[in-house]
Each structure stands twice: as structure tokens, then as C-alpha cells.
């Protein structure tokens, strides 16, 4: 979603009748022609080591971006979790929002 020209590419693919499926961490919104969005928000247990750690922590959950992405097209939320707990912040933020399972 952050690649230069992705908006134009998605529009051209859609115009040619192609199925557009995007995978994203859900940290940046880009308006694209889309049939399915696979969104993988990064939770506390997904912090990499090294140079990307601080950036990952600061960009981890972008609620407004997630809402925008979920309004664009059909979507699936995919989480990588360890143990049995999902971030309380994420669960509370989406309270009352119907989350659909992947098809």
C-alpha cells in the first residue's frame, strides 16, 4: 500500500477486470481499487529486533487507518498472537464493530 503508483496500478487492473487483493499491516491508508483486503495489525508480540523496533511500536495500531481500510472493500483481519490474549487496546477500540471472519 506504500509503493509508488499503487493507486494507478489498482485502477488499471480493475479496469481490465482483474481481482485486486491487497495485504497490509494497516498502518497507512491509500485509496485503491480493491476486491479483498487482508489486514494484519501488528500486536505487542510482533515487535522486531533492531532498527525497525521503534518504528513498529510507534505505528503499530492505527485505528483510523484500519477503519478506512475496512470501509474500502471486503476484508479479513489476520492476527499473529502468542498465548491466549489479544491486545486490550485493540479489542476495546473495536467494541461494537462487527468483525467478519475470513472467507
Image (tube, helix red, strand yellow):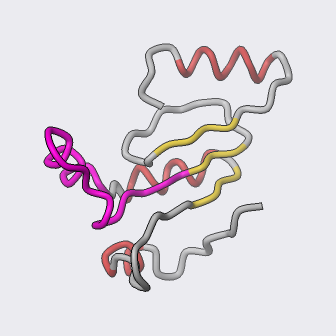
Q: Say whether residue 54 is magenta.
A: yes
Q: Quadrant of residue 76?
A: bottom right
The reply, left or right, for residue 35 in relation to residue 65 is right
Judge by depth and name the residue closer to the eye, 89 or 81. 81
Which residue is rendered at x = 39% and y = 54% of the image?
64
Judge by depth and name the residue closer to the eye, 81 or 1. 81
Badge count: 0
x and y percent of residue 36 in the render? 70, 45
x and y percent of residue 40 in the render? 49, 54
Which residue is rendered at x = 19% and y = 44% of the image?
55
x and y percent of residue 56 in the render? 24, 48
Q: Say whether residue 34 is magenta.
A: no
The reply, left or right, for residue 16 in relation to residue 90 is right
Extreme residue toward the right, this view: 17
The reply, left or right, for residue 21 in relation to residue 14 is left
Q: Is residue 76 above or below residue 45?
A: above
Q: Is residue 6 above or below residue 24?
A: above
The magenta span reads 39-60
Q: Is residue 69 above or below residue 61?
A: above
Judge by depth and name the residue closer to the eye, 65 or 43. 43
**Which quarter of the figure is the C terminus placed in?**
bottom right
Which residue is rendered at x = 59% and y = 15% of the image?
8
x and y percent of residue 24 in the render? 49, 43
Amino acid at each position: 500500500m506504500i509503493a509508488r503508483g499503487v493507486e494507478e496500478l489498482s485502477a488499471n487492473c480493475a479496469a481490465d477486470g482483474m481481482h485486486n487483493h491487497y495485504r497490509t499491516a494497516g498502518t497507512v491508508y491509500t485509496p485503491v481499487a480493491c476486491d479483498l483486503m487482508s489486514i494484519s495489525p501488528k500486536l505487542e508480540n510482533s515487535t522486531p529486533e533492531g532498527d525497525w523496533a521503534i518504528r513498529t511500536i510507534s505505528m503499530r495500531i492505527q485505528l483510523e487507518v484500519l477503519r478506512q481500510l475496512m470501509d474500502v472493500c471486503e476484508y479479513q483481519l489476520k492476527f499473529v498472537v502468542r498465548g491466549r490474549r489479544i491486545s486490550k487496546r485493540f479489542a476495546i477500540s473495536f467494541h461494537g464493530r462487527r468483525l467478519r471472519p475470513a472467507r
